[in-house]
Image (spheres, rainbow, N blue to C red):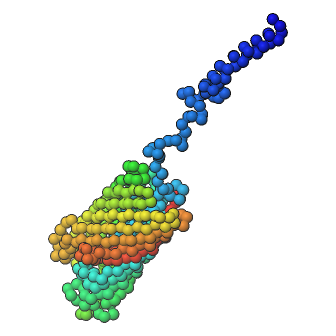
Amino acid sequence: MTPHKILAALSLCFAVARAPAARAADDDPTLGSETAPGGETPESAPSESATPESVTPAPPPPRSPKAGLSFLETYYPPPVDGPELRLPESPTRLYIDGAYAASSDLSALQLIQGSGKNVRFSVGGALRWHRFSFEAEVPFVQITTLNVTALTGGQMPIPADAKQTGTSFGDARIGATWTQRLVGDQLIGGFGLRTRLATHTTNFSFHLQNGDLLTFVFPYYFHIEPTAILGGAIGRFIFVINEGLDVFWGPDGYIEGVLIVVPTIAFWDSHVAVSYSPWDFIAASVEFGTDIQVNEVNDPQFPIQNIRSAWVAPALQVHVGDWRVDLIARLGLTGLAAGTEAFGVLQYIGTNSYTLRVGRSFN
């Protein structure tokens, strides 16, 4: 066999061997690429972007722009004396506020008739410790003006004493709450206990037409206020519900040297409040409160029976960094509950009130 024939035979054998190898490379994806787990190439492996739409995760709830505080701790509905709302979560905070309140009927005091108004300045705050919140408020100045039309027994004061203004210290409030997160920020429940101490110094003296001098001390009460608390945040909405008791318990006092035994009065106290924050720097809220007397007072000196009170409190809050400004109006619904004015007098909060509060929260 000549060299040319041998070379031609070797070329033919090489070509035959190359053809199956080329077909195998076209059919087998493992040639020329890495094998992915499960026999899939990176090009054919499913990616996260191919996840079915039905399992797309829900967006996370909004968070407070203040580091370390939840949405609920930042945009809570502002408590206002009526009595005040208890919060499911409160940041450590300090505040000072001023309030104006008015009552057109003081007859719930039994021993005095007429109208009154009050300007009050208070300092308060809360200390957060784990799931507890300890709160206090001190009304350090009260400026009270009375327009008196009649005193005890229908006696009339002399004209110079019919309108008086007095400055005094108010009733201090202290309390504590414990709450637990039931479903993250969305549902929180717990309990609270608050007291109001009869630390006031308010009194007025009236010269009667017969020449006698009558000193009148407002019959403030020692309050015991246990309550159940429920609240949470849903999106940019916040809700708070309080259900409990407000018990007025003494103290007794003297009027014209006569001991006045103050009866114990118990009210079912209910609050429902919602707040909404469309932007981080502002929020609006509204609160509806009711107090219904649950016991009878069989005392002719204190004919306080079947008192029912209802009020609504719209409010606006503005946030600047860690500072917060609250504008609150509490409006008594006298058409809905006839005892709203009487309850406002007994609480020394008036039928209507308007509050400006400036405070700072601490992470």
Count of numbered badges drawn on the protein: 0
Using the rendered image of the protein, determine whether residue 244 is visible from the camera's viewpoint: yes
43 and 259: which one is in front?
Answer: 43
Q: Residue furthest right?
A: 3
Using the rendered image of the protein, determine whether residue 204 is visible from the camera's viewpoint: no
61 and 303: which one is in front?
Answer: 61
Q: Position of residue 197 (x, y in %)?
A: 35, 67
| Relative height, residue 1 to residue 106 (above, below) | above
Specify the quadrant of the image occupied by residue 136: bottom left
Name the residue rendered at 33%, 68% in the picture.
288
Name the residue rendered at 28%, 68% in the picture.
290
Specify the quadrant of the image occupied by residue 218: bottom left
| Relative height, residue 8 to residue 253 (above, below) | above
Name the residue rendered at 20%, 85% in the picture.
153
Q: Position of residue 351 (x, y in %)?
A: 32, 77
Specify the quadrant of the image occupied by residue 248: bottom left
Q: Position of residue 100 (x, y in %)?
A: 40, 78
| Residue 142 shown left or right of residue 107 in the figure | right
Q: Residue furthest top?
A: 1
| Relative height, residue 311 to residue 7 (above, below) | below
| Residue 273 shown left or right of residue 265 in the figure | right
Q: Position of residue 224 (x, y in %)?
A: 30, 63
Name the residue rendered at 33%, 85% in the picture.
146
